[in-house]
Amino acid sequence: MRKNIERHMWPRLYKIHHLLLKKRYPSRQELAERLEVSPRTIQRDLDLLRDELGAPIEYDKMRGGYYYTNDQFSLIPLHLNVQEQLALQLAYLFSKQIADPLLQDMMYSAMEKIVYLFPNQVSMDLEEWDGIISSAQDTFYNQQMRDHFLLILNAIEKNQCLEMVYHSFSSQTVHNRRIDPYHLRKSRGTWYLIAYCHKRNSMRMFALQRIHSLRILDETFERQPFDIEDYMKGAFFEERGDQVFEVVLRFSAKQAPYIKERIWHSSQELYEETDGSVILRLQVSGLDSIKRWVLSYGKEVEVIEPLQLKNAVFGEVNELVKQYEKNLRKFSE
């Protein structure tokens, strides 16, 4: 008789299931460390998967780990509660309506198959949701970007080196680069690849739309420890610089409500002034992105610190004034 599997166990069972599907032959100790439980708990999970759920688990003595003898085995829970049914319904809707264009087709196809597994629990009729939830697509991609995205994902999974032709905006040059891909990150409508660049001998960020050509090499690389949160610490709108600056900005009383309603940076400190204005203090890496952000608020913001940012904003505004003065003189002549 099948044992009752407690709800909290399913996430762990699924993780073990997917690790075994990859055929990397994890040992009981490795699984325990990965899932942060005891080896004894892992053994109970393996027994439950094999004896109660029919998982084709075997132990390979040569490799010292577990694997599936049939990689087509699938693990499906028997019932979804009301909240889980709603979550799956929304995920199905989002995959069709508001998923990133690079992933939309394959996400929708995958979600459609998942929903088919629960015909009596989740509706496939999305028309009833059309008037309730919607999203504007903020990014558009061509077929080349889609191909590059999938190729990068494949290379990251297999630790394969890549060679690309890349257009650098900072130097306005096109270079051949050999890279070891680590992470894909989407921010403000743009996908970035974070990779070790052999030309610069350091981790770098590359915008996918600036990759002219890309190919997977036969060589593989040994992946080093990498934490995306540590890497992006201090970045403002995905810009990372070599120096960290303390930025202090004063926003007018008119703009203050908008500034107060959002978290602009993990380091931010916000102080309200008696005149209704607000002071925003940040620790950021690099000044280019925050300079463009400050300029977008026009006269509603004042740079207090650092001097480098003050000078950069002043220089940009000064050039803008000259440009418009020149244009206005043409119109008046």
Image (tube, rainbow, N blue to C red):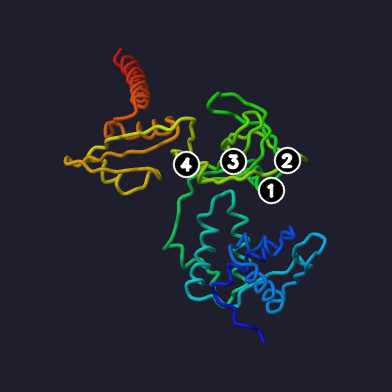
Q: CA distance from mark 4 to mark 2?
A: 30 Å
| Image quadrant assignment for residue 198 | top right
Q: Residue at x 65, y 67 (%)?
A: 39
Residue at the farthest bottom position: 1
Residue type pointed to by label 3: Leu
Q: Is residue 77 left or right of residue 189?
A: right
Decide: is 168 above or below 228. above
Q: Residue at x 63, y 83 (%)?
A: 3
Q: CA distance from mark 4 to mark 1?
A: 27 Å
Q: Which residue is mark 2?
A: 216
Q: Residues within 10 Å of mark 1 (few under 14, many from 20)?
A: some
Q: Which residue is mark 1?
A: 154
Decide: is 220 above or below 74. above
Front position in the image: 34 or 86: 34
Residue type pointed to by label 2: Ile
Q: Residues within 10 Å of mark 2 (few under 14, many from 20)?
A: some
Can you tell which mark lies on residue 233?
4
The quadrant the N terminus occupies is bottom right
Q: CA distance from mark 4 to mark 3?
A: 16 Å
Residue type pointed to by label 1: Asn
